[in-house]
Amino acid sequence: MLDVRQARVVVLSTRASLPALDATVTSALNSIALLCGCYSEDLPRSLFEPGALPECPASIDIGVPANILRRRPDIVEAEMQLARYAAMVGVAKKDFLPTLSLQGSIATESHPAGGLFGKNSLSYSVAPTLSWTIFDGLARNYRVAESKAQMEEAVDNYNLTVATAVEETRNAIGVYQASVRQMNLERETADESGEAVALALDRYRQGLTGFTPLADA
């Protein structure tokens, strides 16, 4: 009965580990649904059905690192912020230039009502206006200096964002390459473990060993 009890312990321990695995599968499906922008029940049915594991390629094409970085939302945001502050510098400098505006009007006038839309009743006027502020208490200089300071801060933030993205991308590539090597080693380990189980089972059936070595194998 010792072997029977030990076998039941192995079976029950295995069954006890299944709920946690099911929860992990459910969490993974929800994460996939979030990435796809849908709910988990809208995912393909093949994801919910048991099947063979897909073959993992030995390597994948990760593309040019610069192209990977430019697809990151944080890089795009930092780049747009930098462009915004650079444009604000141009707007601040524009205040040093004179402003030309045109004012115009068009109307019809006639003594009799029937002549309002005649060719001689049309009148119009155009008046250009040139304005240029010379003395403003250095306000324009301060606005330009403030815009430049904001742009320099945006440049620093952009450089920091790019450096962080490069670090994260290199880390991800390193983890991927290490994972590929780990999968190959684990595949060899699984093959060797299968041989060990077959040998342990053969010895157990011949009565040469107890159940514990077989359970360990």
Image (tube, grey):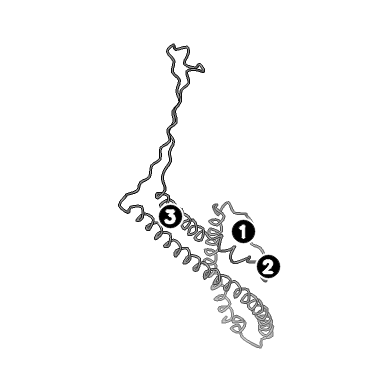
According to the picture, the residue beneath numbered tag 2 turns out to be: 55
**Between marks 2 and 1, how big is the CA–CA gap?**
15 Å
Image position of 28 (left or right of 149):
right
Please state which of residues 111 and 211 is positioned toward the viewer in this rendering. 111
Please state which of residues 118 and 67 is positioned toward the viewer in this rendering. 118
Q: Residues within 10 Å of mark 1 (few under 14, many from 20)?
A: few
Q: Position of residue 67 (x, y in %)?
A: 59, 62
Question: In the image, what residue occupies the spot 44% across and 61% down?
Answer: 154
**Between marks 2 and 3, how big is the CA–CA gap?**
54 Å
In this rendering, which labeled residue sits more in front, label 2 or label 3?
Answer: 3
Disc on the earlier residue, 1 or 3? 1
Numbered badge on residue 89: 3
Mark 3 element type: helix
What's the residue type where badge 1 is placed? Leu
Please state which of residues 204 and 89 is positioned toward the viewer in this rendering. 89
In this rendering, which labeled residue sits more in front, label 2 or label 1?
Answer: 2
Question: In the image, what residue occupies the spot 39% across and 55% down?
Answer: 144
